[in-house]
Amino acid sequence: MSRLDIRIYGDDVLRKKAEPIKQITPELVDLAREMLQAMYDAPGIGLAAPQVGVPIRLIVVDVAKEDETPEPRIYFNPEIAPEEEGENPLIPYEEGCLSVPDVYGDVMRPDRIRLKAQNEKGEWIEERNVCGLLSRCIQHEVDHLEGKLFVDLISAEDKAKNQAALRKLAADQKKK
């Protein structure tokens, strides 16, 4: 069981741009592992440090299905770009978020990305042609590092459909 609390829509930390990490310390690696546990407990497939109240550039993801072996990934200072080789259409996919419970909407994102990030040892790694659910999850979590939420990217129709739920989440957050 994780001791980290996932911040909910309306919390100011979710709208702040996260700060780059200058040095990857054992404490930050421990935070990343704790974030993975919070993500699994929720349950979810991705989590960004701002979602647990820490405005730094750190994300964790694991898109393995329940019946598959877990594949946890930790990325410090992630940078993404659409993959340029070949066709790379924008694909709609229904997204949700641990910080925006019970709200869903289609988001258009590139199918394939390039990822550059630091691993737990501080080494820079690059992954090319990241696609499918992993690509989408990484893009969603990197948005959190920019202070963006998936609800900023959904259609006007989906926004209207979810407006009452978003207002309630924000109002509940202000009461805290």
Image (cartoon, rainbow, N blue to C red):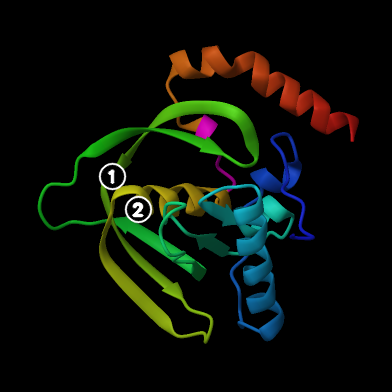
Q: Earlier in the sequence, mark 1 or mark 2?
A: 1
Q: Residue at x 55, y 42 (%)?
A: 148
Question: Residue 173 appears in which quarter of the rendering?
Answer: top right
Q: Is residue 87 magenta?
A: no
**Residue linked to disc 1:** 110
Nearest the eye: 18 or 76: 76
Provide the residue span drawn in magenta. Answer: 147-151
* Amino acid type at image mark 2: Ser
Q: Residue 48 placed where, x, y %?
A: 59, 56
How many badges with numbers are in the image?
2
| SS at badge 1 | strand
Nearest the eye: 85 or 34: 34
Q: CA distance from mark 1 to mark 2?
A: 8 Å
What secondary structure is the stretch in magenta mostly built from? loop
Residue farthest front in this picture: 67
* Amino acid type at image mark 1: Pro
**Quick one: quadrant of the N terminus?**
bottom right
Callout 2 environment at 10 Å: few (<14), some (14 to 19), or many (20+)? many
- Is 29 rendered above or below residue 77? below
- Is 61 rendered above or below residue 76? above
Q: Residue 80 placed where, x, y %?
A: 37, 59
Q: Residue 15 placed where, x, y %?
A: 65, 43
Q: Is residue 29 left or right of residue 120?
A: right
Q: Residue at x 64, y 59 (%)?
A: 49
Looking at the image, do the residues carrying marks 1 and 2 touch, with CB atoms under 8 Å apart? yes
Q: Nearer the viewer, mark 1 or mark 2?
A: 2
Q: Residue at x 28, y 44 (%)?
A: 110
**Residue linked to disc 2:** 135
Nearest the eye: 95 or 142: 95
| SS at badge 2 | helix
- Is 59 rendered above or below residue 154? below
